[in-house]
Amino acid sequence: MMSLLPRAFDVRPGEKFDVVIIGMGPAAYSAALYSARFMLKTLMIGETPGGQLTEAGEVDDYLGLIGIQAADMIKLFNKHIEKYNVPAIMDTVEYFRKENNEFIVKTKRRGEFKADAIIVAVGVKRRKLNVPGEAEFTGKGVSYCSVCDAPLFKNRPVVVVGGGDSALEGAEILSRYATKVYLVHRRDEFKAQPIYVESVKQKPNVEFILNSVVKEIKGDKIVRKVIVQNLKTNEIRELDVNGVFVEIGFDPPTDFARQNGLEVDSHGYIKVDEWMRTNIEGVYAAGDCTGMWLGFRQIITSAAQGAVAAHSAFNYLTEKKRKK
Ligand code: NAP
């Protein structure tokens, strides 16, 4: 049986591990798999099994897994780490600190765990538009996940905001449900991969509104209107829609990095070298939370970083034991 939830096995509070992995997205699972295969005693702690993958639909860009559903991919990840008996607990890591040459990892609900090395794979947070009406109508038409919520907007008109892969992928999915999709983007060039842009351009019910931004979201019990302004002409347009999909990217985990003394780059992402080493000895980072390959964030690139981080942790721990 394959499950969407990983197994906790028998983890005791205060237990010591070789490696504790913080996070539960593809980078974390990959780090867990490689760490276990290096025969390191490994624990994964995260909030959501799959991380951002829970917001994806069909995945067709992971080598070998042709057109797999994201949920099935998460089940396979669980099955794979279970094969190596890696325990995974769903909890929030509040912070970690170094004490007597080992790391103490403090969780919100399960107390503390000890580790000789840490792999941080905490992902990123969704960006907000910060316009009037956005907070008020969140869950009443404003959504941050086209893939998850598209079916709720069957036969209704919607707006998608953004010009990256998420927005274009979102517009493509929404075009299958909504009567009309307005794609509002602040420029007339796209960050998204051309394959997504071309695909959306072919959809008869998608209208591109370029060089434009959302100024306000209005409604009563649900969203009714979105006010859009053209940045070149200043022209204001009122769109009669019931959904607003905000797909404008992600912000780095600045607070987590600051709290734990992790250096960040000029964009706020955790600084790593080519071996995924952070500024703290024994602490590695992988996946979207890092500045590595910024601008090209894929499941497969996160998984690659997780594997490299585990390899570096293995080398570090081997060297540490040798010096004892
Ligand atoms: P992204 O690549 O950072 O793109 C964000 C888009 O939103 C950009 O077009 C940006 O405009 C726009 N934007 C940012 N802030 C805005 C604001 N305040 N108001 C209006 N527009 C704003 O983010 P993403 O599309 O969420 O993708 C994130 C990462 O995940 C990327 O690496 C992407 O490749 C990856 N991803 C991959 C897939 C896939 O391959 N299947 C699917 C989804 C996401 P500008 O263009 O003007 O900067």
Image: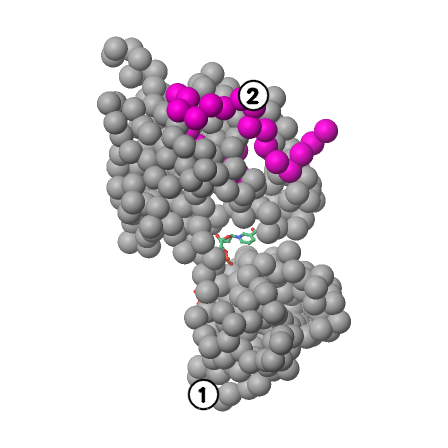
Q: As shown in the figure, which amino acid type bears the numbered disc 1?
A: Asn
Which label's residue is closer to the chain start, 2 or 1?
Answer: 2
Dividing the picture into quarters, in which one does residue 232 lie?
bottom left
Residue 246: percent from the left, percent from the top?
Answer: 53, 66
Colour option used = one colour
Q: Is residue 50 left or right of residue 257?
A: right
Measured in 3D between alpha carbons, the distance from the residue under mark 2 to the one under mark 1, in whole angstroms, is 59 Å
- Residue range corresponding to the magenta coloring: 1-29
Residue position marked by numbered label 2 in the rendering: 85
Q: Residues within 10 Å of mark 1 (few under 14, many from 20)?
A: few
Q: Is mark 1 within 8 Å of ligand 1?
A: no
Residue 100: percent from the left, percent from the top?
Answer: 24, 23
> Residue at position x 48%, y 31% from top?
44
Say what secondary structure mark 2 lies in.
Answer: loop
> Residue at position x 51%, y 33% from top?
89
Quarter containing the C terminus: top left
> Residue at position x 34%, y 16% from top?
318
Disc marking residue 234: 1
Q: As shown in the figure, which amino acid type bears the numbered disc 2?
A: Asn
> Residue at position x 41%, y 22% from top?
15
| Up/down of 46 relative to 197, above or below | above
Q: Is residue 162 left or right of residue 173?
A: left
Residue 303 is one of the magenta-drawn residues: no
